[in-house]
Amino acid sequence: MLSQCHAGCSEVDSLTEAVAGEGFLLGCISCKRREEVPARATVDWHFKPLGEEEFRHIFHYDHPVADILHEDFSHRLVWRGTLNDDIQMGTVYVNNVTFNDTGTYRCTFHRTLSLPLSPELVTVEKEVELSVVTVANRELADVISEIMMYVLVTFLQLWLIAVLIYCYKKIWDEHEARQAKKAQAGQGESKDNCDGVQLD
């Protein structure tokens, strides 16, 4: 879902369903209101497992250093966000998702705007409710598209068979017509020969 757009930066909501055993992109975008203002930002990710009350600090990014802060995510988080100090995309990639990864993820931007009079600190928080499933739930549009594709393929196959049958029938009819003409021609020659014999 597109929520905001500022001079080339678009805030898009993260996906919320991951498949166990696969990777998942935790999206988090915070666009500056004024793109021309220089800024510096750091990003923190916190995680609250399903059924628990407290958030755990799991990741911190301060360009160019990325730190995984919780053992449950050791070697599983990869920074996929902005690769400079002026961070607007704080996305991280989770490798080998497990059912224990189900819960609430909070992404926090700590942004310092370099304004003419004095720097301004801005904090932005976004949350992602992640559910982990065994098999991905397919979108209705994808299912309909696949059904239509199968219908189209089946129709084309039936049409091709019909064309082949028509062509085969046409060739057979032409063959039969030629054979009939040859038979008629042969009968005509035989009659002429018989008439000649009678005249003699």
Image (cartoon, helix red, strand yellow):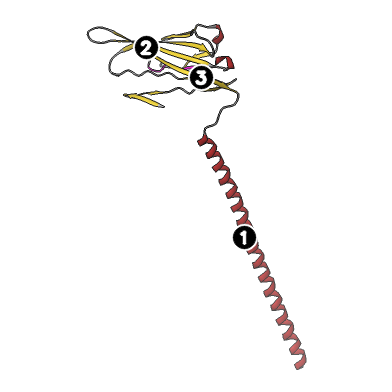
The residue tagged with tag 1: helix, strand or loop? helix
Residue 97 to residue 149: above or below:
above
Res 122 → quadrant: top left
Indicate the position of residue 138 as horizontal and vertical percent values.
Answer: 54, 31
Of the residues shown, which amino acid type is indicated by label 3? Answer: Leu
Q: Looking at the image, which is closer to me, 179 or 113?
A: 113
Q: Name the mark nearer the viewer: 3 or 1.
A: 3
- How busy is the neighbourhood of tag 1: few (under 14 within 10 Å), some, or many (20 plus)? few
Q: Which residues are magenta?
A: 88-93
* Marker disc for residue 166: 1
Indicate the position of residue 145 as horizontal and vertical percent values.
Answer: 52, 39
Are the residues at dot 1 and dot 2 in contact (C-beta closer than 8 Å)?
Answer: no
Of the residues shown, which amino acid type is indicated by label 1? Answer: Tyr
What residue is pinned by disc 3?
A: 130
Which residue occupies 48% across, 23% down?
15
What residue is pinned by disc 2?
A: 85
